[in-house]
Image: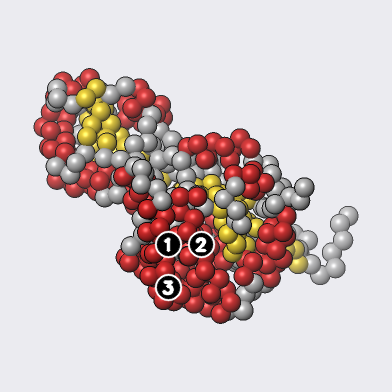
Amino acid sequence: MTNPILPVAQAARAAAARLARADRPSKDAALGAAAASLRARREEILAANAADLAAAPDLSGAFRDRLTLNAARVEAMAQGLEEIAALPDPAGRVLAEWTRPNGLVIRRVAQPLGVIGMIYESRPNVTADAAGLCLKAGSAVLLRGGSEGARSAAAIHVCIADGLRAAGLPEAAVQMAPTQDRAFVGAMLGAAGLIDLIIPRGGKGLVTRVMQEARVPVLAHAEGLNHTYVHAAADHAMARAVLVNAKMRRTGVCGATETLLIDAAIAPALLPLLVQDLRALGCDFRADARARAILPELAPATEDDFATEWLDAMLSIAVVDGVEEALAHIRRHGSEHTEAIITGDAAVAQAFLDGLASAVGLWNASTQFCDGGEFGFGAEIGIATGRMHARGPVGLEQLCTYRYQVLGAGQTRP
């Protein structure tokens, strides 16, 4: 039986070889034309998205939000591609250069990864973001979206193909998986030598499967068990505004705060106000014993609650004694994604940031700033929480590896 990955991966490798030598104007032209196509085909995209939503009426609120497109979100995809085009070309950059005593000049030069396999769930905008970032970074990408958003992803892919054609670049540089069969995912995970990197973006089940089965290097995106810690020296008005945004701006994104940690010294005065603000927006709570001593009406939290990525209007709450106890709670329950501290004490803030193992730490800002666009990357292909290659929002620079160029003048080694 023919390996289902073989024809698309071979086409992707051939396209990657061409793309790696493409100049910046060609890549930027493709991105600009794709953005124009997204705008021109907006009604087609929204109709495809409506069909996806109608085919899955039992989705949770958070899942439906991630799947839903509207005119503003289509425009955001188009603007994202234009922002990527405006960024410097990451490939070919000289990252470092030095001269050895024997006169050899050694350069470390950024280069494309090659062929990237992107496996993702529910978010149609990932189709445009991943395609745009990989294209600009000089790599081909094979996209396998979830079945629930297949129509939306296909409609967006048409626009990317329009852009590639307009710029004279190979359409095989960005391909959609030709089938929704789960066996194709298995073929991608086993495609060592054909795919250079797998990036999973989705729920815990998807990431776990990829990590367990992959024979290809994986850039993992873990769940976002994110914490906001309100320190005793926090400005109360700031804490209220930041927490509302961190939890409720969009509850279904991986940068949403899932647990509030608050110092015991200020909890009696501030916690009722924080709960009042969030409850007015429809949030519910799971609280530890110390928080319930202040607000007895809150439902009790279990250990499992503190290990749950709610992705919904639910917040876990724990009262702690200082920064070290807050850090200990995060180490015990977190996923090393994103954590924030609200405090007016710079020394405490730095101790918190230095004590984290997480990919992103923030001081006096919402955890929902953990986003490639907000970091100035134009877009992101995911949030990496592993310890190798890249961490945090993965943008253009993180989608490159490097090689060495050694320039000599006839030197021979003694």
**Sequence order check: which comes first, mark 2 or mark 1?**
1
Element type at marker 3?
A: loop
Q: Amino acid at mark 1?
A: Ala
| Element type at mark 1 | helix
The earlier-in-sequence mark between 3 and 2 is: 3
Q: Nearer the viewer, mark 2 or mark 1?
A: 1
Residue 364 bears which disc, if any?
none
Is 164 located above or below residue 142 in the figure? below
Give the amino acid type for the residue marked by disc 2 in the picture. Answer: Ala
Residue at 70%, 63% in the rendered image: 11
Rate crowding at label 3 as few (under 14), some (14 to 19) or many (20 or more) other CA atoms within 10 Å: some
- The residue tagged 3 is 41
Residue under numbered circle 2: 154
Nearer-the-camera pick, 399 or 57: 57
Where residue 299 appears, x then y in whole percent?
Answer: 21, 25
Q: Residue at x 16, y 38 (%)?
A: 279
Residue 91 percent coordinates (x, y): 60, 66
Mark 3 to mark 2: distance in Å?
12 Å
Measure the C-alpha gap from mark 2 to mark 1.
8 Å
Q: State yes or no: discs 2 and 1 in contact (Cβ < 8 Å).
A: yes
Q: Is residue 247 left or right of residue 409?
A: left
